[in-house]
Image (spheres, rainbow, N blue to C red):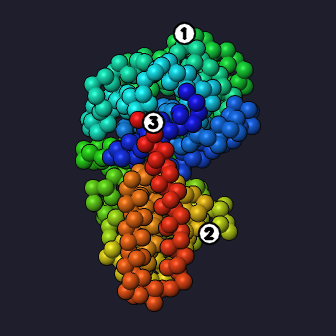
Amino acid sequence: MSSSAERRLGDRIAREIYRDPDYIDDPVLAEYVQGVWQPLLAAARLRGDLSPELAERFAWEILLGRDRTVNAFALPGGYFGVHLGLIAIVSSRDELASVLGHELSHVTQRHISRLMAKQGQQAPWMIGAMILGALAASKSADAGNALIVGGQAVAAQNQLNFSRDMEREADRVGFGVMTQAGFDARGFVSMFDKLQQASRLNDNGAYPYLRSHPLTTERIADMQSRQALIPPNPVNATPTAEHAMVAARARVLSNPGVDALRAMLAEADGDKLATLDAPRQAAVLYGAALAASRLRDFVHARGYLERLTALVRSDARAARLSRLLAAETALAAGDAARAAALLNATPTGPGEAGGEPSLARRPELILMAQIATQARHTGRVAEVSEVTQRLQVWVAAHPRDAQAWQLLSSASALQGQTLRAIRADAEAHVAVLDYAAALDRFKAAQALLRQGRASHATLAANGAADHIDASIIDTRQREVELLFKEQSLDR
Ligand SMILES: [Zn+2]
């Protein structure tokens, strides 16, 4: 299978995943994962595992799933799936890097395309349906069956498994990539131990990753010989507060049931909390505050947040996460003004990234845009206008950010810029590869323009700007038309 055909197949699968209700674009978790992922990609390029051509042709994009089971997998075309359950159980960035480096190597070593080639003459849509079926089957039983395609999920899973040799190669190359990227090799070892422990407990239901990655005697032997090369410094068993808080966030977002949320509160209220080290206390308080917010118990959420803020005061990264959560919670409580104030508050912790405007980072920007565009939140014209400008700069650099486009659409609509709002809405659909829906919107914008020209109303009010918007819309409509035709080719 050629790399461009594989990319088209990957796009087809990704488009379905974007539509799945379990797909989640949480800016805090996404940023954390990117912080591990981008150095791995850079290292793979540096080592020559990832050719410039493949780097350019494939998506290299991670799609997060709300599932609480432990799983990560490579898909055709350079797409990757990561369940929140994996983020919730790793103890460090290094452990996460060891899993992502392994999956990355399945793609750079072209294991996926070799598997695809084995599917012989099957139509790409058939292979796509099989992969989606296998993904649905690997989800936890109560996660819903949104992705089930046909009844051959289990058979498909077996056909799509990598060979033992491929797994060993992904271990070897992945280890090289993660260490080259500067991650601690001991993360590879401790992750392996973690999986071995789960495997001994026969915890297959919670660890679908173990089903696709059985710990064969060869892999264990490879692991032991690699371990001999690693300096035997004691592993620092304490996670950073930042990591522990991110893991707690993954745990809450993947366990939205009331009982699970209440259990998070109980953890923060129990006597055991005081016996934990500071990072773990921070994680418990963070999880409890987020859980209370989800339960709409904002009084308790604020109580946990106050304790958390005091605890992480001297840790800049952790303090930032707690500030973001405080703003997010205020917004959920309907207090947009307070949310904005919290987000704009001057960082108090020592060593906080100085000089960098806070809105330059995606979680802050997305949250500020959500605050500014809340329907009930009126009378903040300047805020909406500022956030619109920042979003425009952001999407110019990150055109595949669907959430940012969607917020730009809302912000433009609030300012009466109807054409720009429709165009941004169209781009949000392009970003999730739904070209048909995007074309509908471009056509709606063109119809509006014709109407405006007929009545001279729009042009009179907004002349030059509309003229520019009109030409952008025409150009983009033609480009997306081409993408749509290409997408329909591989039937
Ligand atoms: Zn593997």
Can you tell which of label 2 and label 3 is closer to the viewer?
Answer: 3
- Name the residue beneath numbered marker 1: 217
Say few, some or many: other residues with alpha carbon within 10 Å of mark 2 (under 14 / 14 to 19 / 20 or more).
few
Where residue 180 sits in the image (x, y, percent)? 72, 34
Q: Is mark 2 on a helix, strand or loop?
A: loop
Tell me which amino acid carries mark 3: Asp
Say few, some or many: other residues with alpha carbon within 10 Å of mark 1 (under 14 / 14 to 19 / 20 or more).
few
What numbered label is drawn on residue 357? 2
Q: Image point 39% across, 53% down: which residue? A: 436
Q: Is mark 1 on a helix, strand or loop?
A: helix
> Label 1 to label 3, Cα distance in Å?
41 Å
- The image quarter in which residue 452 lies: bottom left
What numbered label is drawn on residue 344? none
Tell me which amino acid carries mark 1: Thr
Q: Image point 74% across, 32% down: which residue? A: 48
> Label 2 to label 3, Cα distance in Å?
45 Å
- Name the residue beneath numbered marker 3: 490
Taking 465 as reference, is 239 above or below it?
above
Q: What element carries label 3?
A: loop
Q: Image point 30% across, 32% down: which residue? A: 149
Taking 113 as reference, is 486 above or below it?
below
Say few, some or many: other residues with alpha carbon within 10 Å of mark 3 (under 14 / 14 to 19 / 20 or more).
few
Residue nearest the viewer, comparing 138 with 308: 138
- The image quarter in which residue 101 lies: top right
- The image quarter in which residue 361 lies: bottom right
- Marks 2 and 1, the one that precedes in the sequence: 1
> Label 2 to label 1, Cα distance in Å?
51 Å
Direction from residue 68 to residue 77 in the image, left or right: right
